[in-house]
Image: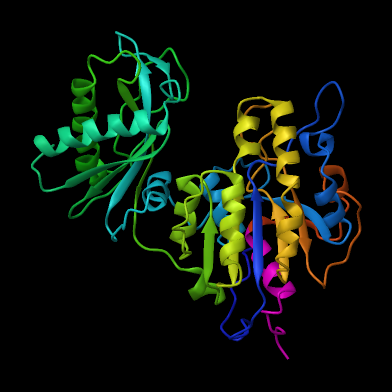
């Protein structure tokens, strides 16, 4: 079933209900073998539990049964876009996330700085996670090399921008670019990077430009032991995108520490200029600007990062740290407050998964059915199982922004 299409007469113009979407990235988990409890069921989160007792609860299906979402599709779904029909590559999201003003027809790819051995095999896919300062210096060296001797005929402009830690983004600007190209990151060590293969004939020129770029990187970083290669994921072309304002009549702002999440927010027309350095700074930015727009998106990364590291205890502690901030979120008094995740990242799996995600929706129209924010309670909540791309229609209804459908 497709998500609600929101005909013009369903959206109430000039409605004033405010929405706050709080994303605990990767919040869903799996039971620990020793306790039978997930990270969320283990954590001491009295503030979230108290909010849950006054809220509607349920579980979100991020994409489709058995489908493990990436962060981009997971967030697009939360914003009301079916990720199976709105396909956006990671490169475009990264470019938007670093503030690059993409034009229709630009292409982009996200890159990892990596460590390669003397035979070209991958030693570390993230080059030891360099600091922002160290990685930025490497990116500046590479960009200077591109400017000194342009790759190819020079008709396509290549821009390389640091994103965060080991991540950077490469943007191609020129005429007739296509970007249906395979990744070079095999997502394992001990093997060589894969070849960037054009998946359609029209993408061959872009793939050839990238091959030239890879060669230039190896040349510039030849004497480096740790940071001496790149791995590519998410080649994509940008062709514009319908905004939250166009679809739902919402103005929006995003507050996220990591560029990729600012990128997906900018893709759908949110303002995303704030670049907080900590969760505390994120909350302060939200408090300072709350009420200036209709829709606020606040992102917390730690649960996902620690889940991917396989750190069960660390993920539990990250949820407890976030819980301490919840009273300040409630004090903002949004008409609708949603707490959920873009996907599950079980520590026992050490990766994103296809499992449902716990959902909390608070408004004066909620029907409380449980006493805690945890998977076992949310599974029996009054919202039942909801597709992520249908969450926006629930939020708009609770905010008084949807009219009656039909006579």
Residue 122 in the image: above or below residue 375: above
State the residue in front, 48 or 23. Answer: 48
Q: Residue at x 26, y 44 (%)?
A: 203
Residues drawn in magenta: 389-407
Residue 228 visible to an observer of this rendering: yes
In reply to whether residue 157 is colored magenta, the answer given is no
From the top left corner, tell me how far across and down residue 356 is, in percent.
73, 45
- Which image quadrant for residue 290? bottom right
Which quarter of the rendering shows the C terminus? bottom right
Q: Residue at x 65, y 41 (%)?
A: 26
Residue 150 visible to an observer of this rendering: no
From the top left corner, tell me how far across and down residue 369 is, in percent.
91, 58
State the residue in front, 256 or 206. Answer: 256
Q: Is residue 269 left or right of residue 173?
A: right
Q: Is residue 401 left or right of residue 214?
A: right
Which quarter of the rendering shows the N terminus? bottom right
State the residue in front, 197 or 109. Answer: 109
From the top left corner, tell me how far across and down residue 143 is, in percent.
21, 37
In reply to whether residue 391 is colored magenta, the answer given is yes
Residue 120 in the image: above or below residue 262: above
- Which image quadrant for residue 82? bottom right
Q: Is residue 205 left or right of residue 300?
A: left
- Which image quadrant for residue 69? top right
Q: Residue at x 75, y 46 (%)?
A: 324
């Amino acid at each position: 079933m497709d998500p609600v299409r929101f005909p013009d007469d369903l959206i109430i113009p000039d409605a004033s209900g405010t929405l706050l979407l709080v994303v605990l990235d990767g919040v869903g988990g799996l039971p620990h073998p020793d306790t039978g409890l997930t990270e969320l069921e283990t954590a001491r989160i009295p503030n979230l539990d108290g909010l849950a007792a006054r809220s509607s609860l349920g579980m979100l299906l991020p994409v489709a049964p058995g489908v493990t979402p990436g962060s981009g599709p997971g967030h697009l779904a939360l914003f009301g876009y079916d990720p199976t029909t709105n396909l956006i590559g990671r490169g475009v999201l990264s470019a938007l996330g670093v503030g690059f003003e993409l034009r229709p027809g630009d292409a982009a790819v996200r890159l990892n700085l990596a460590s390669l051995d003397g035979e070209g095999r991958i030693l570390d896919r993230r080059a030891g996670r360099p600091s922002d300062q160290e990685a930025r210096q490497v990116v500046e060296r590479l960009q200077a090399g591109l400017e000194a001797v342009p790759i190819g005929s020079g008709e396509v402009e290549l821009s390389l921008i640091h994103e965060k830690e080991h991540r950077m983004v490469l943007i191609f600007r020129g005429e007739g670019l296509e970007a249906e190209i395979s990744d070079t990151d095999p997502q394992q060590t001990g093997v060589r990077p894969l070849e960037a293969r054009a998946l359609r004939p029209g993408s061959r020129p872009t793939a050839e430009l990238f091959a030239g770029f890879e060669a230039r990187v190896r040349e510039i970083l030849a004497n480096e032991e740790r940071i001496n290669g790149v791995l590519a994921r998410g080649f994509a072309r940008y062709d514009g995108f319908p905004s939250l304002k166009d679809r739902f009549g919402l103005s929006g702002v995003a507050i996220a520490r990591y560029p990729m999440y600012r990128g997906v927010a900018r893709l759908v027309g949110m303002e995303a200029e704030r670049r907080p350095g900590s969760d505390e700074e994120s909350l302060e930015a939200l408090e300072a600007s709350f009420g200036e727009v209709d829709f606020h998106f606040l992102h917390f990364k730690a649960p996902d990062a620690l889940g991917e590291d396989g750190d069960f205890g660390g993920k539990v502690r990250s949820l407890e740290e976030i819980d301490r901030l919840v009273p300040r979120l409630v004090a903002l008094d949004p008409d609708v407050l949603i707490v959920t995740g873009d996907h599950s990242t079980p520590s026992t799996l050490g990766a994103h998964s296809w499992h449902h995600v716990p959902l909390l929706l608070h408004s004066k129209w909620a029907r409380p059915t449980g006493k805690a924010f945890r998977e076992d309670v949310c599974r029996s909540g009054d919202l039942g199982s909801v597709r992520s791309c249908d969450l926006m229609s629930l939020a708009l209804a609770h905010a008084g922004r949807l009219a009656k459908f039909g006579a």
